[in-house]
Amino acid sequence: MHARFLVIGGGLSGLAAAIRLARYNDSVVLLEKHHRVGGLNSYFYRERQLFETGLHAITNFADRTEKKAPLNRLLRQLQISRDQLGICPQIKSEIFFPDRETLIFDNEFKTLESEISDKFPNSIDGFHALVSHIDQFDPFTGTFPFISTKEILDNYLKDSLLTQMLLCPILYYGSSWKNDIDFSQFVIMFRSIFQEGMFRPAGTIKDLLDLLVDKLKIHGGELRLNSGVKSIVTNNDKVTHVVLTDDTEISCDAVVSTIGLQETREITVPSEISESVERLSFVENIYQLSTVTHPRLPADRTIIFFNNSDSLKFEPPASLVDYRSGVICFPTNFKALDQKKNFEVRTTHLANYHLWSELSYDQSDYKNEKILLSETSLQQTEHYIGSFAEDIIFRDTFTPLTIQRYTGKKEGAIYGSPIKIKSGKTRYENLFIAGTDQGFLGITGAMLSGISIVNQNILAGS
Ligand SMILES: Cc1cc2nc3c(=O)[nH]c(=O)nc-3n(C[C@H](O)[C@H](O)[C@H](O)COP(=O)(O)OP(=O)(O)OC[C@H]3O[C@@H](n4cnc5c(N)ncnc54)[C@H](O)[C@@H]3O)c2cc1C
């Protein structure tokens, strides 16, 4: 079989890349190893009820009028209308360092500015200078060596508590580096989270994925599920074909891989030696309650980013899970969201992949630790937001092993490797990397990555 363009991986970046390719070309095939698309952001059913696996909130909120905003550009490129997506803005979110300070932010940047002015008056001028630096910085061009954001923030703000508070949401929603983030990545995330804001679609993630699959099919693209790629075969400087796990061979003119840089190298033939890098892994808990609202839980908070240690540690912990910091999310607390779903609380913490991996040799130990994790995180969350344990009707826990199993992401590292290939180019002239390891993270980032890699490397030359 021959396809002109192959896209490997049916996550959000692969779907977006395939739609762009199919809009301008015949013979585009998207290969996904699972029976369902979505990758890190997908869904599952329990007793016929749909649960989202990854959706807390989507970054890069923008009003309809902001034609040049990343969200509106993304929707135009995919020919999706805002009404089809249904945009429900966050209510407000909080950065919460117990016994020290709280900062509220929402989709109006001035809310964060006035919080900083009230609570860190000595740093407000430095914060404004930092924002001008961010506004003038172009994070998309050039290949910079790693620039420490922590050092830049400390220099501008002169308050390590404020540095840590601003870093907390940004590291949790987009850093693949330990205890810091490269400044160009920080600029992208600062704009996406604080200057633009967060929202969720009115429907479920399944509705969004269905919409994307429909778009692909309308443009004549083909989606092949249960089609894992076993190898990407090269000759000299070009990919000639891929081999699927059932040994089907598909020759092609070009390949866009969204499965990760190292993951791609490992299946490339002849094989390439890939340096091993430290990755950050997470655990995620879902608690579903019996009612659509809850008398004790906050109705006006969308996400709470917390840290209760003296200095925020964003690194693989020495134990299975680090409960000292994390994210508490209320996926039904969005404006204009039709409240049909039961109230949910989700929690995220840093985890140690290697310890979870050792544990998995004994299934009962693994199961018991998952139960303990769900319980410990619940108690900590109740301590911060009020009690709700008695109202839980369903709970689930993902470890780094769950994430690795369902997405193929090495070590279950949601944000991939700290080595990013911004251009998407590899040493093979017709093999490109998009998605997490290209450098744009999260749902919007993944889709923008798929689009921009195709636009720059394939459509621009055709
Ligand atoms: C628990 C959790 C919560 C999250 N919350 C949010 C959030 O609230 N907001 C947000 O913006 N982002 C969130 N994210 C991150 C976001 O989901 C990801 O950044 C984004 O979806 C990455 O998309 P991707 O296409 O780059 O990668 P992936 O989603 O990993 O897609 C890669 C795809 O490739 C497939 N694949 C792997 N190997 C092969 C192979 N050999 N052959 C064929 N197919 C293969 C995988 O099955 C997968 O479908 C969350 C992630 C998780 C896990």
Image (spheres, rainbow, N blue to C red):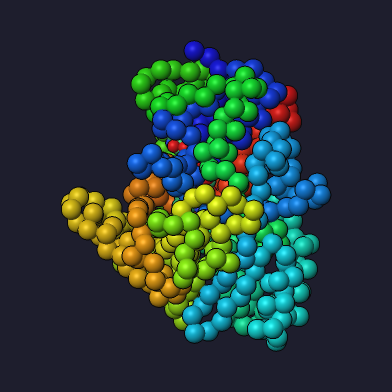
Left or right, 391 with reference to 203 = left
At 78% across and 68% down in the image, what residue appears? 132
Q: Quadrant of the C terminus?
A: top right
Image position, residue 177 (x, y; %): 51, 60
Q: Quadrant of residue 78?
A: top right
Q: Nearer the viewer, residue 429 or 226?
A: 226
Image position, residue 187 (x, y; %): 67, 60
At 76% across and 52% down in the image, what residue appears? 63
Q: Nearer the viewer, residue 265 or 412?
A: 412
Residue 46's place in the image compared with 400, above or below, is above
Image position, residue 101 (x, y; %): 56, 81
At 34% across and 55% down in the image, what residue appears? 393
Image position, residue 176 (x, y; %): 51, 57
Left or right, 329 with reference to 380 = right
Would residue 285 be visible to someone looking at this image?
no
Residue 238's place in the image compared with 98, above or below, is above
Left or right, 375 with reference to 432 = left
Q: Quadrant of residue 105?
A: bottom right
Residue 15's place in the image compared with 349, above or below, is above
At 33% across and 65% down in the image, what residue appears? 390
Q: Residue furthest top?
A: 1
Q: Quadrant of residue 370?
A: bottom left
Residue 25's place in the image compared with 117, above or below, is above
